[in-house]
Image (tube, rainbow, N blue to C red):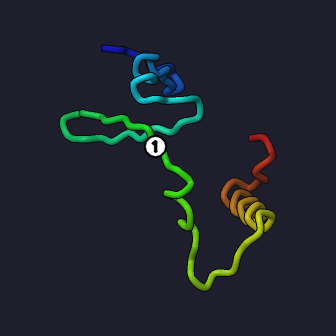
């Protein structure tokens, strides 16, 4: 059974045998499901474009440009953190 050690930052290197079994590649997302009796299930989150197409659509809502999205995120970030998203902490 593969074993991994967690760093003080909570990071774990997934053993190669597990990465291969799950067909994981750099940048893949993992879902952790906490079940009873301390059992944790880990599974890759694999979504195709077809699975997520149209998820943001809302009837009656006008389209928004990427620039408008960026500005909205910047406003929210400044409201939450008092600084711009591109400013270092």
80 relative to 35 in the view: left or right: right
Q: Which residue is at 49% across, 57% downward?
A: 51
The residue lying toward the viewer, choosing from 54 and 42, is 54
11 relative to 87 in the view: left or right: left
Seen in the picture, residue 53 relative to 81 is either above or below; the reply is below
Q: Secondary structure at mark 1?
A: strand
83 relative to 52 in the view: left or right: right
Q: Most extreme residue toward the front, as rendered?
A: 50
The percent coordinates of residue 44 (x first, y second) are 43, 38
Q: Pick the quarter of the image with the N terminus.
A: top left
Quadrant of res 5: top left
Other-residue count near label 1 (Cα within 10 Å), few / some / many at <14 / 14–19 / ≥20: few
The percent coordinates of residue 60 (x first, y second) are 61, 85
The residue lying toward the viewer, choosing from 3 and 10, is 3
Q: Which residue is at 25% across, 41% downward?
A: 35
Q: Most extreme residue toward the left, as rendered?
A: 37
Q: Disc 1 marks which residue?
A: 45
The percent coordinates of residue 54 (x first, y second) are 56, 67
Q: Which residue is at 77% across, 53% downward?
A: 83
> Disc count in the image?
1
Q: Most extreme residue toward the bottom, as rendered?
A: 60
Seen in the picture, residue 7 relative to 71 is either above or below; the reply is above
The percent coordinates of residue 25 (x first, y second) are 55, 29
């Amino acid at each position: 059974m593969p074993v991994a050690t967690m760093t003080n930052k909570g990071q774990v290197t997934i053993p190669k045998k597990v990465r291969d079994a799950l067909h994981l590649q750099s940048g893949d997302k993992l879902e952790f499901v906490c079940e009873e009796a301390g059992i944790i299930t880990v599974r890759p989150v694999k979504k195709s474009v077809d699975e997520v197409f149209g998820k943001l659509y809302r009837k009656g809502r006008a389209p928004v440009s990427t620039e408008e999205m960026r500005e909205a995120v910047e406003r929210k970030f400044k409201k939450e953190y008092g600084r711009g998203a591109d400013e270092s902490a």
